[in-house]
Image (cartoon, rainbow, N blue to C red):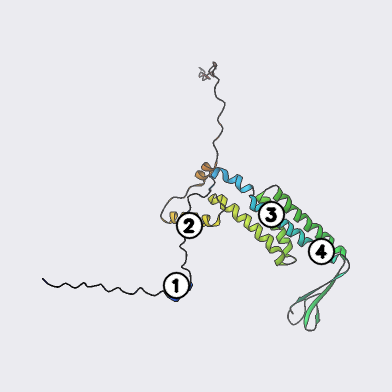
Amino acid sequence: MSDTSDETPEIEPAPRPSLKDRFLKPPKERSKEVPVDFDQLPPAERKIAMRTMDRNEIRFGYLASAIALLFSLLATVPFMFGPSQVTKTAKEVNGACPATYELVKGVCTQTTIRQPSYYVLPLILYLVLSLSIFVTTRMKRRVATTFTTLLTGVAFTSISIAIGAPLLIYGIWLFLRARRIQRFGTTDAKIAAKLSAEQRLARKNGAPRPTARERAKNSKTAKPTGPQASKRYTPKKPVKKKPLPKED
């Protein structure tokens, strides 16, 4: 009999993880598929959803009206207790200061004295715009709230861009959410982006786009039919006889 020796296979050492793998977390894999259980409105209900605001939009609407009211008071009321001085600067044009500007310490400067009555009209205007945001939010009207918020933001940018920026951002946010509801039936930005990518891929592969008539047909509800005939005897409508040709 021959002696057999048990040979143990050599085990290769496991590779050591790099410093990047030790201290940094691996990136999460993004799911490219759209979740199945997301709420997508049918085309017939999207118009109603576009007109009304949800809870989060209403809360931000009240916050926007409060911000507008605060800015209205801060921009006008402190200057209504006495004359105020406003100083503006400008650059030289062809070696000279513009009209109504004077050269003070090498800088073109314009100094204006404003009376308290100067701020009465801006205060009324800002208060009306702030109230319009509150009223349209209270009515849950998306289009009206978007318009009044953007208008108020533009009005406040005449004072400072930083003051009007929050209102402009809120108005643009409302508009984009309404746009997503119109196109995709959802306000979720991630789902809308994935659906948009799927639509672009389908068009790239040659899938036909729905025509305007098909989209309108899908968005319309069922037309109401006429009254049904009674179970009792209903006489038939008389058939109109064609007139006989006249004989010469």
Is residue 42 shown above or below 201? above
Which residue does the image show at 68% across and 64% down from the upper left? 165
- For marks 3 and 2, the one nearer the N-term is 3
- For marks 3 and 4, the one nearer the N-term is 3
Location of residue 15 in the rendering, given as x and y in whole percent from the top left corner: 37, 74
Q: Residue furthest left?
A: 1
- Give the secondary structure at mark 1: helix
Could you tell me how far apart the alpha carbons at marks 3 and 1 are, in whole angstroms? 45 Å
- Give the secondary structure at mark 2: helix
Q: Residues within 10 Å of mark 1 (few under 14, many from 20)?
A: few
Is residue 12 shown above or below 44? below
Query: Which residue in the protein does label 1 denote?
Result: 21
Mark 4 residue type: Thr
Instruction: Determine whether, in the image, residue 54 is placed left or right of residue 36.
Output: right
Could you tell me how far apart the alpha carbons at marks 3 and 4 are, in whole angstroms? 23 Å
Query: Which residue in the protein does label 2 denote?
Result: 197
Is residue 229 shown above or below 108? above
Query: Which residue in the protein does label 3 denote?
Result: 61
Query: Which residue in the protein does label 4 denote?
Result: 76
Instruction: Determine whether, in the image, residue 27 is placed left or right of residue 151.
Output: left
Q: Nearer the viewer, mark 3 or mark 1?
A: 1
Mark 3 residue type: Gly
**Circle 3/circle 2 CB separation < 8 Å:** no
Q: Nearer the viewer, mark 1 or mark 4?
A: 1
Location of residue 206 in the rendering, given as x and y in whole percent from the top left corner: 41, 53
Which residue does the image show at 81% across and 60% down from the upper left? 123
The image quadrant that residue 157 belongs to is bottom right
Q: Residue furthest right?
A: 82
- For marks 3 and 1, the one nearer the N-term is 1
